[in-house]
Amino acid sequence: MSSLDPITLAVIQAGLGQVCNEMDIAFTRSAFSPVIAEADDRSSGIYDKTDGSLIAQGELGLPVFVGTMQYSTREMIRLIREGSVLPPEPGDIYIVNDPYLGGTHLMDVRFVLPFYHEGELFCWLQNTGHWPDIGGMVPGGFSAKATEVEQEGLRLPPVKLFKKGVMDTEIYSIITSNIRIADQRIGDIRAQAAALRVGERRLAELLDRYGAETVREAIGEIRGRAATLMRAHVAGIPDGVYRSEAFVDSDGVVNEPLRIALTVTKSGEGLHFNFTGSSPPCRGPMNSVVATTYSAVYLAVRHIFPDTPLNAGAFEPLTIERPVGTFLDARYPRPVSGCAAEVSQRIAEAVFLALVKAIPDKVTAAPAGSSGNFALGGFDPERGTSYVMYQISGGGYGGNAYHDGLTNGCSTIGISKTAPVEVMEQYYPVLFSRFALREGSGGAGRHRGGFGVHYEVELLRGEARASFVMDHGRFGPPGVLGGEDGARNVVRIHRDGQVFVPEHLSKDQDIPLTAGDRVEVMTPGGGGYGDPALRDEDLIRRDTVRGYYPDTQGFPAQSVVAFLDASDGYVASDGASSVHPRGDN
């Protein structure tokens, strides 16, 4: 039994979360790159000094980093104990992006600060930020055709970038000598370090107020309560074995789908996840390191039970059998640029598809499940500078037992959002000629899937190279319980009056563009939930009036005809409704 009164416990719990939130906010507000400053592709957390387990993560951080940063901290502690990494001292900040040491892709760069209180190591503070370039074969790092990790960019083991508060200029020089637009990285590096310093000050204030022992006791109690709550949630799932499968379009090199086979076994208060039967390691960059695989399972379960506090205790009732011999347990030198942004979302999708059979009132149909990674690198002759533009995009969420899926939601793995097109047009020589709702892309169902987006971006001047690593171009996000699949991802390159569709549909690299060429992307819609014939007529009326289905697709034909006969709208000869879109969902 804890000796803490409930109010003190609640205040300390909120205080730990606030430390992380302030680190995230400081990082975003001071970062140079739009992918961090506008899209919020970053996260911050507090980790145990002994085993690296998650103490707290902010509400504003990417969920996929929950498991990876915990794993990464644990690996760094191991290397320090083995003598492979220098031991910490006050003022130090380590930098690491090695995916095989608890990372994701190489562009996700982690900074780790040892936090001392009264001369003793109390915990670790860590943040992750997506750098717009880390070197490698293509600008932006998303090499769709890489066959080894060295082709994807610079790989850093844990090294001290800051020693006793002072940046090591030699290590900084090594980094900037191996990446593009190197002169701009100092802004992100300073921002990332400053965010940790903010966390250091805020956590010190919390410990000074309550004392180290009281905060330690609170951390243990918070973790125990999270585990208890998750066990209670799991206990509500009927005992049994639940199976599902999900597919990655291809690995970018071999044009064949990759299979994720999942068996979830529920017994008592525990869930066991087994990926036996999944595809073997692949040649291209769609391998997933084990930390990302574990984290994808964790974030999927937390999507289902979002009220569970975010710390290591929430995952104690979950056991994952390491998927040895599959593409979900990448070992050096397998390329991994697509693991966090794409493969992790197929893993989460498999979890949803398995558990929706057991708890249909708590699980949605499949969401769009792609981050829409698009990178454009080139030289702007007007400004006389090189650039790397990185774009992420949203898609539809799956329908659920209570309502339709969200339209243009962020990816399954995070809270990152598309940077405003106005900002992108100011930074880079591009024009977004279209950024719109992708009408009709949500899978039909009693509750339909949300819609994706449809955008076109034109290169205004100079020459550039386009690369992208996306998914769901071969298979749309699956509907469940009778619902239909969401629309598939579509990529088109408009060049010299010709339209080019990549062989791998959602993956390609080094596509040369000149002024006037355009890249067109249509992101997936979410899967439908339940039999479309059971959809409420008021919802059919709303969607038809708003023009969401201009060709009347997505509804049972008899329902549309019955509605149109009783309304002021009509279907024109080309299948489009006469009414105009208005509003959004």
Image (tube, helix red, strand yellow):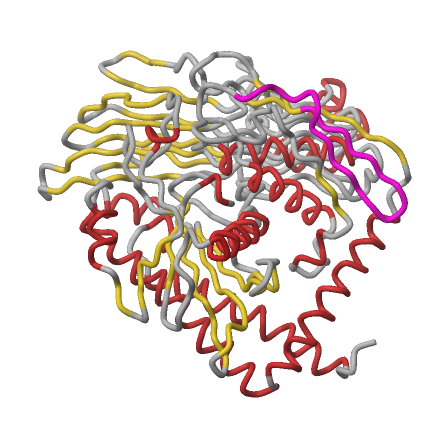
Please identify the residue farthest to the bottom as the structure is shown. 209
Where residue 266 sits in the image (x, y, percent)? Answer: 85, 39
Q: Is residue 503 left or right of residue 246?
A: left
Residue 550 magenta-drawn? no
* Residue span colored magenta: 261-281
Q: How many marks?
A: 0
Q: Residue at x 75, y 40 (%)?
A: 363
Q: Is residue 63 left or right of residue 422?
A: right
Q: Is residue 28 visible?
A: no
Q: Within the image, what quadrant is residue 538 found in?
A: top right
Please identify the residue farthest to the front as the structure is shown. 83
Q: Which quadrant does the C terminus fall into? A: top right
Q: Residue at x 57, y 33 (%)?
A: 368
Q: Is residue 194 visible?
A: yes
Q: Nearer the viewer, residue 520 or 94?
A: 94
Residue 335 vertical placement versus 31 (above, below): above
Where residue 133 sits in the image (x, y, percent)? Answer: 30, 41
Q: Is residue 237 left or right of residue 298?
A: right
Q: Which quadrant does the N terminus fall into? A: bottom right
Residue 204 vertical placement versus 260 (above, below): below
Q: Nearer the viewer, residue 39 or 323?
A: 323
Q: Residue at x 34, y 13 (%)?
A: 500
Where residue 281 sits in the image (x, y, percent)? Answer: 54, 22
Q: Nearer the viewer, residue 575 or 390?
A: 390
Residue 275 magenta-drawn? yes
Q: Residue at x 42, y 34 (%)?
A: 373
Where residue 511 sits in the image (x, y, percent)? Answer: 28, 21
